[in-house]
Image (spheres, rainbow, N blue to C red):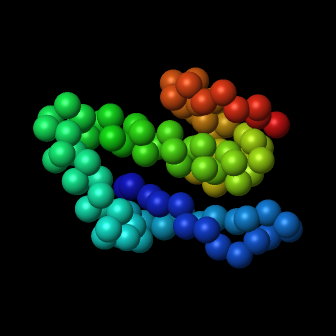
Amino acid sequence: MIQTIVPRAEENGHMAFRLGSFSDLDQRTVDAFVRRLYEDNGNLSLKQLMNGLERKIILSVLTRTKGHKRRTAKILGLKPTTLSEKAKRFCIQAEFK
């Protein structure tokens, strides 16, 4: 199941997130992805687009957690080792705590 990250109230001075279902995505966001695929005339695959989206989500959560690896992994529903593997694959050069 594809999940989205939805910000909610701060907890202990940190922005907290909850995972929502794919249906929580704004239709304009989905339309923007479809338009990007359509306008690229087949040069961009769905996999490439999704990898780009995944990279941006990881970077966004890392920024909000100030680079805290375990907190980022927990928010994303990943093991810290999986997050590290994805960071390496997506060339994310973050200073993890």
The residue lying furthest to the front in this view is 39
Measuring from the top left, give residue 11's x and y in whole percent.
79, 70
The residue lying furthest to the left in this view is 41
Q: Is residue 80 above or below residue 8?
A: above
The quadrant in which residue 22 appears is bottom left
Q: Taking 28 as reference, is 35 left or right?
A: left
Q: Taking 83 as reference, is 70 left or right?
A: right
Is 96 or 71 nearer to us in this picture?
A: 96
For the image, the number of numbered tags is 0
Residue placed at 39% from the left, 67% from the top?
25
Q: Is residue 82 above or below residue 37?
A: above
Q: Taking 4 as reference, is 83 left or right?
A: right
Q: Taking 96 as reference, is 50 left or right?
A: left
The residue lying furthest to the right in this view is 12
Q: Is residue 55 above or below residue 29?
A: above
Measuring from the top left, give residue 73's x and y in whole percent.
65, 45
The quadrant in which residue 29 appears is bottom left
Residue placed at 56% from the left, 25% from the top?
91
Camera sees residue 34: yes
Residue placed at 63% from the left, 39% from the top?
79
Camera sees residue 72: no
Q: Quadrant of the C terminus?
A: top right
Residue placed at 20% from the left, 39% from the top?
40
Q: Quadrant of the N terminus?
A: bottom left
Measuring from the top left, give residue 59's x and y in whole percent.
60, 43
Measuring from the top left, give residue 68's x and y in whole percent.
77, 44
